[in-house]
Image (cartoon, helix red, strand yellow):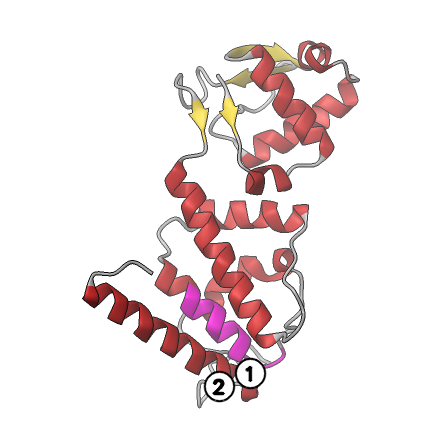
Amino acid sequence: MKIIIDSDFLEGLTYRGVLALVAVNALGDGSWTTAQLSQAVSCNSSLMLEGMGELHTLCPEFIGKQTKNKWPLGTGVASTEKVQILESDSTCRQDFLDDVKKAYEFVNKGLPFTMGSADGAAVKRWLKQNKEVTREEWRRALGNRYKSEGVVKTQALYLWIGRLLEYLEAPLDRYGKTMPNGIGGKHGEALGREQGNYAARQSAVAAAGVQS
């Protein structure tokens, strides 16, 4: 087994997770003890134990739960095929981050959007848990969140992404109730207009058969 990663996935790992990833790729399919994995990258067992736990959390379909001090990898877990992050998943993640960045920088003029390792891991988990959510839906939820009352517009992504779908239907007031007029403040109004204009441009491009 070989796990092929991209930069977004890597950002979600601590250095312990990276060590474990290197060890997993070095040993391949099978059932390996923490000690064997540690020896593969010349690190101590405690670091490897934490790193493997991290990988199991992020990739449970390929990194099995430790049983009798052994970690099942690939075979017998979910697949005997080469493991890789599919291009479609990577594209979906990039589309999501592009939309998050655009919304953030629109309501926080002059403040660049940044991401840390915790944000990367949170995005990966959210997308994995919400595969049925379309781009149109998450865009609407993002817009509604920024239109809502009491939202900390500069809050780190990992602190709020888990609640994003609460805003899918409409903006919320400070008590978590649907807002009567559907708009919260001038940023909400402006963002709503911006998203409407963007959607109109995309529809016009699609109708003309031209890629944006």
Secondary structure under tag 1 reads helix
Instruction: Look at 48% across and 86% down and name the residue there.
Output: 189
Secondary structure under tag 2 reads helix
Q: Is residue 84 above or below residue 30?
A: below
- Residue 105 on the magenta span: no
Amino acid type of the residue that numbered disc 1 sits on in the rendered structure = His
Give the position of the C terminus as an image quadrant: bottom left
x and y, in percent, of residue 205 in the image: 27, 67
- Image quarter for residue 138? bottom left
For the residues bearing labels 1 and 2, Cβ distance under 8 angstroms: yes
- Residue 144 on the magenta span: yes
Instruction: Look at 53% across and 13% down and name the residue there.
Output: 28
Amino acid type of the residue that numbered disc 2 sits on in the rendered structure = Glu
> Is 54 on the left-hand or right-hand side of 99?
right
Q: Nearer the viewer, residue 117 or 114?
A: 114
Residue 189, numbered circle: 2
x and y, in percent, of residue 111 in the image: 67, 69
Residue topped by disc 1: 187
x and y, in percent, of residue 82 in the image: 42, 20
Instruction: Look at 68% across and 9% down and name the residue there.
Output: 36
The number of discs equals 2
> Is 149 on the left-hand or right-hand side of 189?
right
> Is 14 on the left-hand or right-hand side of 128?
right
- Image quarter for residue 85? top left
Q: Is residue 201 above or below residue 79?
A: below
Instruction: Look at 58% across and 11% down and name the residue there.
Output: 27
Q: Which residues are magenta?
A: 139-150
